[in-house]
Amino acid sequence: MSAIDVLVPANAVCRLHAVVADRLRENGHDVALVGVDTPAISPTLKNILQMERTVLRVRLNSLLDTLQAPILSPARPDAALRLDLSGGDQQFASPVLAPSFHGCPSLSNAARLLMLGQLPDVDILLDGVNPVAHAAPMVDSRLSIVRGIEDVLARMVTLLVDTAQRYLNDEPAGRVSVGRPSEGERPTSGQMVSAYMLSVVPRQVTGVVKRLAFNLHRWNVSYRFHKGRRVADTGLLAGEAWITLPDDGSRFYADPFPFEWQGRHFIFVEDFRHGGDKAVISMAEVFGDGTATVPRCVLEEPYHLSYPQVFSHDGEIWMLPEGGAGGNLVLYRAGSFPDRWERHEVLISERELYDATVLEHGDRLWLFATQRDGYGSASDTLVVFHAKSLQGPWVPHPANPIRIDRAAARPGGRFVRVGDRIVLPLQDGTDEYGGALGLADVVELDETKVRLTVPVPILSPDKSTYPKIHTLNSSEHLEVIDCISPVLRGGLRRARR
């Protein structure tokens, strides 16, 4: 057990500070919240966030919600580590870990970058000088500063708690390469108001107009017989023409996974009906001439399902869909392929895991997934588990989280073997969720190390970066992708005819 002082604004203790302290206590440490005479977040930023919560009707248990009657303790000279969450410029006795938002300790700097349409990174500094860990948080909403700040703070908590634990364990700091963060200055009230009025408000108005005119969150699934040259082999979408899997206009299909069985070709998809609150898993059969059946539902749960990864192992056919909303990672067995699936076993319980992807490598099985760590996005925190058998037990990798990176964490399809290489498609959320996909090589993978290359973007036939691709999968003969495909809403679509 180590004594840790968490330094917080004495008059503005919030849920963020309590979450950090509680997680460190869960790790077995003696943690105290120590009040510091420093201002809380700027009044201007506080007013902007409150205005958004009122006007945009944002309902969330925010990390910035003020705690009533928090228990504060005096500073302890013998503390093994101090975490500075005061946001000020005061100096404290070493060792101190403190977050930096794009080179500035003030959260206002992160907020201003979000207002300008940029995505702030987070560094953890040791004694105010040395960067020891880095994160590039995913921001799911680009039109709400209060939601954007929540995503950034959530991954700051993940990074800070993990870095503190590794520091106290005398483990190597920073599992990703980090450089000296660029210097950032605390923005003035005028700069924040100007950024909000001249950048955020116009984007919000444009967003409202687009949402009224278009169904923006819609996807198309396309497929083709690849004849041995897959996207993973070339890095290009060139080759045979893609065929779109049609829908009836009341739904969309996404997250396609092909599977071949007894000479027949199937595509399993997320099937989401417009206006619904969850998706089911459906299946279509593709024939040799390229035609396909209408997808039909083969698996439904009370919560959202997607990413229907179907694979064979030990003489059985299995499905490991994404069901993060259910709180467990559940394995299904084909009772009667392809239509009947039986809930077989919970592989990993009480974790919100997304797009968990299976790899057989060495003498064991591996799972790569992103984890929603209590708050924030589900698309930026890569975690890995391993097991001797499919049924487990599944052991979390000691290097978790492997990386926190909006452009290189969330799997976008199954692993592909290209010669001696093991390639994993990874989603790139820099522009937006589903905005792009890259291919990364697994360089090292064992019980102590996980290392992947920086993803290389998939290119179009003219070798320009291809945007809006979200999932890539292939079987021996069939290859599938999905892409964002907004469509005009019903009334406007009829008016154009």
Image: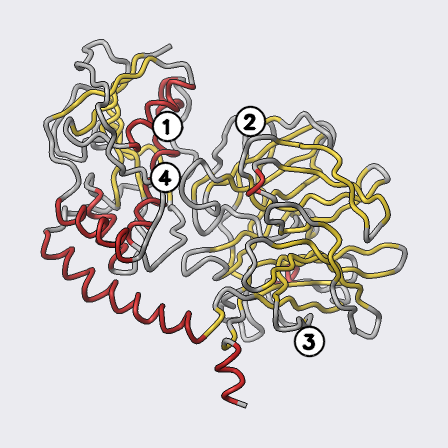
Would you say the residues marked 4 and 2 are in contact, meaning their CB atoms lie under 8 Å apart?
Answer: no
* Residue 281 quadrant: bottom right
- Cα separation, mark 3 vs mark 1, equals 48 Å
- What residue is pinned by disc 1? 161
The residue drawn where x is 36% and y is 18% is: 168
The residue drawn where x is 70% and y is 67% is: 223
Query: Residue 370 has which mark?
Result: none
- Cα separation, mark 3 vs mark 2, equals 43 Å
Mark 2 element type: loop
Would you say the residues marked 4 and 3 are in contact, meaning their CB atoms lie under 8 Å apart?
Answer: no
Kind of residue at badge 1? Val
Kind of residue at badge 3? Ala
How many other residues sit within 10 Å of disc 4, few (<14), some (14-19) or many (≥20)? many
Q: Quadrant of the C terminus?
A: bottom right
Mark 3 element type: loop
Q: How is the image coloured?
A: secondary structure
Q: Nearer the viewer, mark 3 or mark 2?
A: 3
Chain-order first, disc 3 or disc 2: 3
Query: Residue 241 has which mark?
Result: 3
- Cα separation, mark 1 vs mark 4, equals 11 Å
Mark 1 element type: helix
Compare residues 365 and 5 and report the one nearer the observer.
5
Kind of residue at badge 4? Ala
Compare residues 417 and 304 and report the one nearer the observer.
304
Chain-order first, disc 4 or disc 3: 4
Residue 486 % position (x, y) = 51, 72
Which residue, as the protein is rendered here, is positioned at the far right?
A: 262
Query: Residue 448 has which mark?
Result: 2
Q: Quadrant of the N terminus?
A: top left
Query: Residue 154 has which mark?
Result: 4
Q: Is residue 68 above or below residue 231?
A: above
